[in-house]
Image: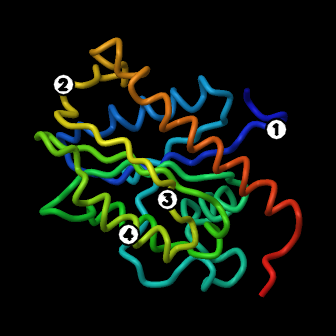
Amino acid sequence: MPPQDPFLVPVIFGSVRTERQGIKAARFVTRELERRGCRAVLIDPLEYKLPLLDRRYAEFEDGTAPEPMRKLGELYPQADGFAIVSAEYNHGIPPALKNLLDHYLEEYFWRPSAIICYSGGYFGGVRAAMQLRMTLAELGMPSIPSLLPIPHVGSTFDNDGNPTDPEFVNRNDDFFKEFLWYMQALRVQRDAGPVPY
């Protein structure tokens, strides 16, 4: 059952490659969260074009951060959770994703994250997902226990992010239910008051 106030979920996508296929997965995740009553916002690094990290958003004087950085800096503290859609580059996290994440810190605190990983081959990006778990925990948005790995991402979805296998949604239903459970649990704790330290 969707919450009375819809969960706000930035869907952070991490590839800027010309022939990127993972955008299909990001579109699927965005639509699937919306179908479950969330307000999902796709964050595409090609749209926001953040510079290579020099200063985090919080280090800018008020009103001096680049506009795309400011927009995300105002959106993220309103979020209930973050869906991270990651490729695997050389067994690791794509540089565009790491750069996009590293511009913020406190804006993520006390919100769960869900990892959706993908690759063009059989393994579905799970090696990058293991590294991503460490990064997300350090950023203050620890990931839920389950992963959503997507092998052969180019043929798993059409260009609009619709699964080519009708059973794909049902097979991954528990992943989304788990993410919503964690968002509800941490929302209750955030509403209860400040962290006790």
Are the residues at dot 2 and dot 4 in contact (C-beta closer than 8 Å)?
Answer: no
Q: Amino acid at mark 1?
A: Asp
How far apart are the two marked residues, 1 and 3, measured between alpha carbons?
Answer: 22 Å
- Which residue is denoted by mark 3 in the rendering? 143
Upstream in sequence: badge 1 or badge 3: 1
Q: Quadrant of the N terminus?
A: top right
How far apart are the two marked residues, 3 and 2, measured between alpha carbons?
Answer: 27 Å
How far apart are the two marked residues, 4 and 1, measured between alpha carbons?
Answer: 31 Å
How far apart are the two marked residues, 3 and 4, measured between alpha carbons?
Answer: 18 Å
In the displayed structure, would residue 43 be above or below residue 197? above
- Which residue is denoted by mark 1 in the rendering? 5
Upstream in sequence: badge 3 or badge 2: 3
- Which residue is denoted by mark 2 in the rendering? 155
Q: Quadrant of the C terminus?
A: bottom right
Residue occupying the point 68% across, 28% down? 37
Q: Amino acid at mark 2?
A: Ser
Answer few, some or many: residues within 10 Å of disc 4's Cα (few below 14, many 20 plus, some between 14 and 19). some
Upstream in sequence: badge 1 or badge 2: 1
- Which residue is denoted by mark 4 in the rendering? 99
Q: For the residue labelled by badge 4, is the local secondary structure a helix, a strand or a loop?
A: helix
